[in-house]
Amino acid sequence: MLQQFVRPAKAVAACLTLVSAVACSGGASIDSPNAPSLASTTARQDTPVEEPPPPPPPPPQGGEGCTPGFWKQPQHVDSWPAPYVPSQTFAAAFGVATFGDDTLLEVLGANGGGVNALGRHAVAALLNSASDGVSYNMSAAEVIAAVQAALAKGGNVERTKNILAGFNEQGCSLN
């Protein structure tokens, strides 16, 4: 009866289970979660594999900006990017009524500091961000959101004006 189960074979590998590993002779292997790796016996199967680092971010845009003085000059009106025109109201462009019915061009010419200074730099920033010829630091949507936040109750007018002024004074690539 024993002969039925034990038969000689030419290509049969002998395997022996030792506590938590499987050792085989003849180059055979048995898949076992506890079996040592043939390539390396130092790494465990449950050791996390390090993922490659993410690709580097794209280079930052920006570094250019035209001042409010540039945009208000009659000879530069042809540089205004669509959909903005000098006769458009500040309220229509920015969604806030701070300047009443004043146009973008009128706000560019407003004298003084505070809200007026923010208005001048807001219009210039909006035109810079929408222009294909200016590599501006912000998108038009970002400029509008920043101006709305600054003009909202509790907003920081001076801080926002300073940020936009810094971007607007980086140097103008337009003629």
Image (cartoon, rainbow, N blue to C red):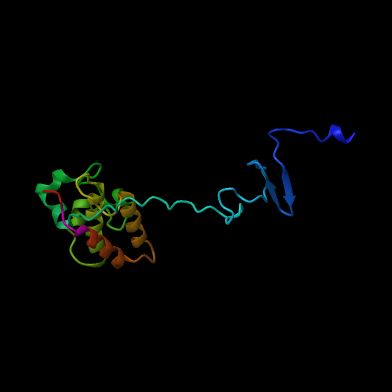
Q: Where's residue 173, x and y in %?
A: 15, 50
Q: Where's residue 52, x and y in %?
A: 45, 51
Q: Residue lying furthest left in this view?
A: 75
Magenta-span inclusion, residue 169: yes
- Looking at the image, which is closer to me, 140 or 17? 17
Q: Residue at x 83, y 34 (%)?
A: 5
> For the stretch drawn in magenta, what is the main secondary structure?
loop
Left or right of 164? Residue 7 is: right
- The magenta segment is 168-172
Q: Residue at x 36, y 52 (%)?
A: 56
Q: Quadrant of the N terminus?
A: top right
Left or right of 14? Residue 5 is: right
Vertical placement of residue 14 versus 143, above or below: above
Q: Where's residue 74, x and y in %?
A: 10, 49
Q: On the image, which quarter does residue 8 sit in?
A: top right
- Looking at the image, which is closer to me, 27 or 123? 27
Q: Residue at x 25, y 52 (%)?
A: 136
